[in-house]
Image (cartoon, grey):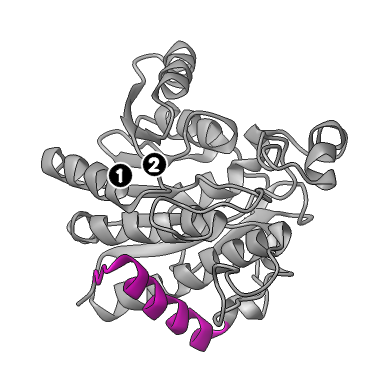
């Protein structure tokens, strides 16, 4: 096990199949490069097909014989998630890595096509639904993994189970984001518990990129949103470095179910095993979120 883990440590992934959401830019693009560079076939699941095709061209230019394909996925629409998953499962025989990477940060208040608060709806419920649809093929693939992208922002996160969508309290863009990122880790724990209980050959793990310079957060109109780009360039690490914890969680042999990887110094540094917050390790909260998520999406993958 390398002390300074890099993409050179990724084992040969020839014959493996991965899905990466939000693969057209930032962390998702770097994750795609890493997986494709090791020989995996990568499905780039993106909302904007034009941007995704341009990103795929980048990967093909960088990686000789890269096996990447673009498919449309809008995590803000449960119908789109279902269509993507059904199309993928109809033509696939295996799924080794489900990379739930895509995310939104500190948006102005808005809702998904299904009426969910946008950040909770995309960052958590969209990925919950995608995973739920793909559980059968994951369970049919020995050694498969679900990797959820969380954030160091999960640490101040608080689950508002009485008002997850901010329908009755004043909307807080950062509070909503922190809640969604805490949800990613609670979801990971609940999913891992169910994989174990069902005897599945699959594990659920998570990662975070620390402070990595991407376009994330620049869509909002708050003061801090406007400061992210200029200050981020100075204080953050590159997306290529920020993607390493996710890639390590997704590919390193011997990773334990439920493991969480991040930068050594929280905001930056080499990818290492990390302990999530106490709130993220609350088993009761994980079960509550699971039950609510099943109800909101009408999906019951282990029933």
**Mark 2 = which residue?**
74
CB atoms of marks 2 and 1 within 8 Å:
yes
Residue appearing at x 79%, y 33% in the figure: 229
From this view, report whether residue 58 is shown above or below residue 78: above
Q: Is residue 289 magenta?
A: yes
Residue 90: give x, y in percent of width and height. 12, 42
- Between 89 and 228, the one nearer to me in the picture: 228
**Mark 1 = which residue?**
80
Q: Residue furthest front?
A: 168
Q: Residue furthest bottom?
A: 284
Mark 2 Cα shell of 10 Å, populated few (<14), some (14-19), many (≥20): many
Residue appearing at x 72%, y 59% in the figure: 174
Q: Is residue 120 left or right of residue 72?
A: right
- Between 218 and 102, the one nearer to me in the picture: 218
Residue 22: give x, y in percent of width and height. 48, 38
Residue appearing at x 46%, y 66% in the figure: 256
Disc with the residue nearer the chain's start (2 vs 1): 2
Q: Residue furthest top?
A: 61
Say the numbered circle drawn on residue 293: none
Residue 175: give x, y in percent of width and height. 70, 65
């Amino acid at each position: 096990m390398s002390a300074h883990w890099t993409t050179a440590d990724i084992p040969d992934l020839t014959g493996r199949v991965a899905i990466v959401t939000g693969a057209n830019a930032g962390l998702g693009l770097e994750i795609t490069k890493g997986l494709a560079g090791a020989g995996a076939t990568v499905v780039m699941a993106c909302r904007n097909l034009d941007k995704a095709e341009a990103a795929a061209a980048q990967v093909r230019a960088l990686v000789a014989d890269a096996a990447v394909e673009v498919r449309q996925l809008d995590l803000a629409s449960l119908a789109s998630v279902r269509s993507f998953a059904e199309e993928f499962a109809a033509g696939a025989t295996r799924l080794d890595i489900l990379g739930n990477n895509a995310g939104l940060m500190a948006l102005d208040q808005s809702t998904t096509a299904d009426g969910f608060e946008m950040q909770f709806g995309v960052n958590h419920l969209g990925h919950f639904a995608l995973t739920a649809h793909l559980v059968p093929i994951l369970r049919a693939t020995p050694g498969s993994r679900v990797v959820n992208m969380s954030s160091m922002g999960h640490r101040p996160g608080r689950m508002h189970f009485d008002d997850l969508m901010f329908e009755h309290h004043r909307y807080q863009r950062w509070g909503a984001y922190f809640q969604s990122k805490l949800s990613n880790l609670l979801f990971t724990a609940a999913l891992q518990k169910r994989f174990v209980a069902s005897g599945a050959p699959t594990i659920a793990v998570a990662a975070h990129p620390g402070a990595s310079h991407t376009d994330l957060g620049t869509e909002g109109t708050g003061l801090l949103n406007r400061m992210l780009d200029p200050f981020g360039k100075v204080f953050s690490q590159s997306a290529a470095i920020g993607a390493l914890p996710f890639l390590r969680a997704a590919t390193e042999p011997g990773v334990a179910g439920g493991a969480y990887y991040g930068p050594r110094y929280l905001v930056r540094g080499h990818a290492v095993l990390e302990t999530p917050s106490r709130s993220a390790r609350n088993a009761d909260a994980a079960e509550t979120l699971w039950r609510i998520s099943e109800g909101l999406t009408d999906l019951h993958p282990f029933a």
